[in-house]
Structure formats: C-alpha cells, structure tokens
Image (cartoon, rainbow, N blue to C red):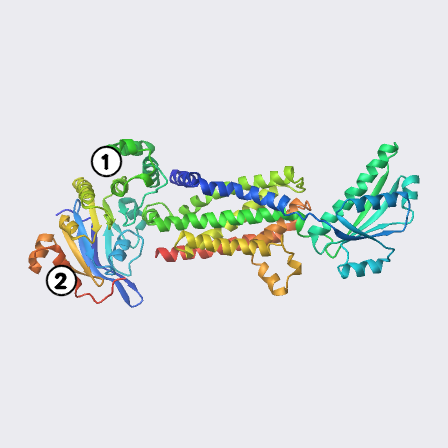
Amino acid sequence: MKQFLVFVKKEFYHVFRDRKTLLMLFGLPIVQIMLFGFALTNEVKNSKIVVVDYAKDVSSQKIIHKIESSNNFEVEKALLGYNEIEAAFKEGKIKLALVFPSNFNKDLMHLNKSQVQIIADASDPNTGNTLTNYVTSIIMDYQKELMTNANVPYAISPEIRMMYNPELKGAPNFVPGVMALVLMLICVMMTSVSIVKEKEKGTMEILLVSPFKPFLVIISKAVPYLMISWVNVCIILLLAVFALGMPIKGSIFLLFAESTLLIITALSLGLLISTQTESQQTAMLVSLMGMMLPTMLFAGFMFPIENMPVPLQVVSNAVPAKWYYIIVKSIMVKGLGFSAIWKETLILMGMTMFFLLISFKKFKIRLA
Amino acid sequence: MKTPVIKANKLTKRFGDFFAVNEISFEVYPGEIFGFLGANGAGKTTAMRMLCGLSIPTGGEAQVAGYNVFTDTEKIKKNIGYMSQKFSLYEDLTVLENINFFGGIYGLTDKQIKEKSEKLIAQLGMGSEAKKLVGSLPLGWKQKLAFSVSILHDPKIVFLDEPTGGVDPITRRQFWDLIYDAADNGISVFVTTHYMDEAEYCNRISMMVDGKIMALDSPANLKKQFSVASMDEVFFELARGAKRKAD
C-alpha cells in the first residue's frame, strides 16, 4: 500500500510540475462551457416570422409593434390557416409563426388571462429555441407593462410548439456534451501520454524490473486524472448552474457516479492507446483524432444522431460519449433516476471491461 | 568456491524458429564485475531480460540470487537492481524525490530511505543539488545518481545495460569508481557495454555472437587466447564470424 501511495505522489508531482498541461486540464472545461454557452449561441437577427392575427385588437397590435421594432425579426402579417403555416415552414420561408386567437384582448381584459400560440421550426433547435425565447420575452414584457398600469394580474400564456424536433434535442443541452467531451479528452489523452512517456524515457523498464506490480503502475497513473476529472465535473456543473442558469434536476450523486464510470471508461481507453503506441506524439494524436472527433460528431450534442444516415447511427453506438450524453441528459435535464438509464450504464460498463481486457492482454504480451 | 549469484545452464529463448539466445551457460559470483559483450542483435538484451524476470525463457535453467527465473520472478525483482542505457530517473522530480520514489517502490521504510539518501548524497557530493530537478543536472551526474539509486535497496546483483552511453571518458572513469565500490561491498555487477576500454575493467567477460557465448574469461586470458594486444581485436575476431545482422 505504501508503495502505491509513493507512486501516486510521484504522479501528482508530474501533473503539477507541468504548468502548461495543468493550465489546459483546468482551462479546457471553463473555455468549453463559455464557448458553447455564450460565444456559440446563435444571435438571431432578421429572421422571417409570420404573424397570424385573428384578434386585430389593441393588445395584439401592441405586441406586433414591439416585435417589429425589436429588429430581430422580419414580420409578415397574414391570415393563414394551419396547413398554410406548415407549408410555409416546409418551404423554409419562415422560422416562426405567432398566432393570436380572435378573442385575445377580450379574454385578457375580462378573464385576466389569454393565450397566444408560438410555433417554431426546431429542425435547427438552436435557432428555434432562441426565436421562441425572444418572442416570449417580448410578450412577457408587454404583460408587465399591463400590470404596472392596472393592479390586476394579467396572464398571457404563450403556448409553444416546436415543430419537427419537439424535445429540442441538441442545443440547449450542450452541458452534458461538454462534460463528455472534456472527460474523454483529459482522461484518454493524459493517461495514454503519461504511460507512453514512461516507455519513451526508459523509466518503464525500471518500473517493470522493480517489484512494483505492473497493473499497479497503471492504477496509480489513473488516480491523479480521476481526481482532476472530478474537479472538472464540479467546475462544469458549477458553471452550468450559476453562469448559465441550468438546473440539475436529478440526483447529483447519481450524476457523479455515472461520470466516474465514464472517466474509468476513458482511462481504460487511454491505457489501450498507450499499449499500442511508442511515442508521446503518436499517443496524443491518436487520442485527439480518435476521441475528440468522434465524440463531437457522434455524442449527439452537436449533430442530432436521429438525423444521420443509418450506417452512421450504427457507428455512433461505439462511441462511449454517446451513452454518457444520454445518461447525463436524463439526469440533469429530465431529472430521471437510475431505472431510466441502467441500459446505458450497462453498455458503458461493457465497453470499459472490453478495453481493459484487451489492454491487459496486450500489456502482458509486451512483457513476455 | 562461493555460491554463484547468477547460475545459467543452457538458458534459451526462442521466438518461433529463431533462437535469440541459444543455450548460454555461465556463472557470476558475489562481488564480481561481469562484462556481457556482443554486437547489436547478438541476444544480450534478451538474455538480460530473462535474468531480470521480464521474460520467461523457453529452455534451459537459471537462478538469479538463488531464485528460479521460471517461477520466482517476483522474488528475483526484489533482489536485483537495474539501470538501462537510456537515462532512467524522472527529470521533473528533484534528486531527493527520485530517491524517495525508488526507495518507496522497493519497499524501504522512511527511516531507511532517509539514512540512505543522506549517505548517497554525501558520497556523490551533491549536497547543494539535492533539491534541484534531475533534469537540470549534467548527464554524468544523472548517470552516477541513477546507478546509486539502482543499488539503493542493497540488491545482490545489479544489471547495467550500456550504462555509460554518451558520457565523456573522465565521467566514465568516475562512474566505474562507483561500480568498484559496489563490487567491494559484495554486490555483483552484470554490465553490457560497447566500450572496449570498459571491458578491460571487468573481472570476467563473456562474448556473445548469434545468441551463443563464444568466449568467457578474464580480459587478460582472452587476449592471450586470441594472441592479440587489445580487447578491441578480441571483439573483432569473434564478431566477424557473426551471421546475424545488427538491428
């Protein structure tokens, strides 16, 4: 045990002495969250929307005027039936439709509540969501104005309908994606590089000749990255909650447990890469190309997997990040418990066992 | 006659129909400096790996520090030291941290490590460098340090795989002083080298050609046997007959 601790201590020295890598380890999640959270949000300008105003009353006119003057939209007024709206969407003419029912103002004044329908094209979920948010906030703005003028609580409830992609899979839920990406990157790359480094520098031979068990070498190497990854999960979650206002609906404990599982999957993948490569550069390249790209493409947080051709959908099943992404989304966004994600968990476990089995086999062959 | 520390009898390693090491037999005694010579690809490294417990032989038998290389590799590992041709300490750790680490993985107690590191640093005259990163030290110092670390746990035998590659002659001489010290303290030294002047420092030398030991004797006797003036010529005489190409 003492031998093990001595080794882990040494690994921490390696990590903390290498300032640049350290900066990357902790800077990466922050930069990613900020990038995806702020820089890459679609600031939607001059989107075409259609306003279907059956009410034609004071309130609807005021709201329409507000929308027109907000310069985010190019408003077209038309009295369209539902089928025509759908046709306009299909042709890609409009991104959003706003429908005022005929008794909009009347309901608002007499019943103090009224409804308005917002239909958005969510085939590009980012845009759909942003537009809906804009329109909703404009309506809410109007509602506030009404409330300050009169002391009656008015309530306009926008009824939002996302067309083609009702669950808005993708964009607003990028946090789970970033978690998957960061954990995969750090764990796979750092473990493979740090093991290959020992090979390259000749210290691996010394370790193998020593009475220290080879499999302990690997475990001690994994420990610092496991801990760093936990810290990173915390950073990402804190940023998500406090900087982006994204709540965590499910159990945080379960989230950490599942994250640990992905970390172990990634560590074993890193180990596998390290048994196959001889230089740090190769290990880094393989990890980057082999991890980052598939994770970005196939995890499902940048490009909806449902929209991919079937062969690619099949390929995506081999990407551990995909399953983790589903798990995290279920916990964070939908607030589901373990019973909803046991299948995905099992798949990740299976992958981990598989990677570990191959790498230990390869490791032994190298020793013989 | 003392009991040998290494006893190899027809030790063989075979990969398919290629005999990397072909029935080598020799003995190494306590406190002896045993030179293990041969051209590149002659099978030196494979032989050494088998003796270190890194590779299981396919034939013959051998004992290292009294333990069988087939079955007791873990016990062998505790009783040997090893230093390779590549520099083998951690460059981003300080001198003391390296000593603590290697002492630690060989299972020395904190007290033992402290005593030994003080003695070692005094012996090498590195008092002011103890807290410096190993990467900042000159190569000669690193290698002397690596050797001292490799015998930190008082092994019965230390394996040195081309320990002095890339070092100037003066530092090499100093390095050999350390080897003599170790041998005087009863540690057997098993050393491979390509420097024939170093071969002269050994008590006995074995010459490997194509996986076999073609000659084994003291440097003086070898020169007499081949009627030549230097070890260089002995080496050429033997290596000329090699059929295998260097890798």
Task: Residue at 22%, 34% (x, y): give it.
Answer: B123
Q: Whole-percent x and y of residue A237?
A: 60, 40
How packed mark 1 is, by other alpha carbons closer than 10 Å (few <14, some 14-19, many 20 or more), is: few
Name the chain letter of the residue that bears numbered label 1: B
Task: From the viewer's side, name the closer residue of B18 and B3.
Answer: B18
Task: From the viewer's side, name the closer residue of A31 and A4.
Answer: A31
Q: Whole-percent x and y of residue A54?
A: 90, 51
Labels 1 and 2 in the same subunit: yes
Identify the image quadrant of the N terminus of chain A. Answer: top left
Name the chain letter of the residue that bears numbered label 2: B
Disc 1 to disc 2, how far (Cα)? 39 Å
How packed mark 2 is, by other alpha carbons closer than 10 Å (few <14, some 14-19, many 20 or more), is: few
Task: From the viewer's side, name the closer residue of A247 and A40.
Answer: A40
B180 is higher (above) or lower (below) than A48: above
Q: Whole-percent x and y of residue A366?
A: 37, 56
Q: Which mark is residue A262?
A: none
Would residue A81 be found to the left or right of residue B7 on screen? right
Q: Secondary structure at mark 2?
A: helix
Would residue B176 be found to the left or right of residue B79 on screen? left
Q: Secondary structure at mark 1?
A: helix
**Which quarter of the figure has residue A109?**
top right
Identify the image quadrant of the C terminus of chain A. Answer: bottom left
The residue that mark 1 highlights is B124
Check disc 1 and give the amino acid type: Leu
Check disc 2 and give the amino acid type: Glu
Task: From the viewer's side, name the closer residue of B99 and B10.
Answer: B99
Would residue B217 be found to the left or right of residue B52 on screen? left
The residue that mark 2 highlights is B237
Would residue A85 be found to the left or right of residue B236 on screen? right
Q: Whole-percent x and y of residue A70?
A: 77, 44
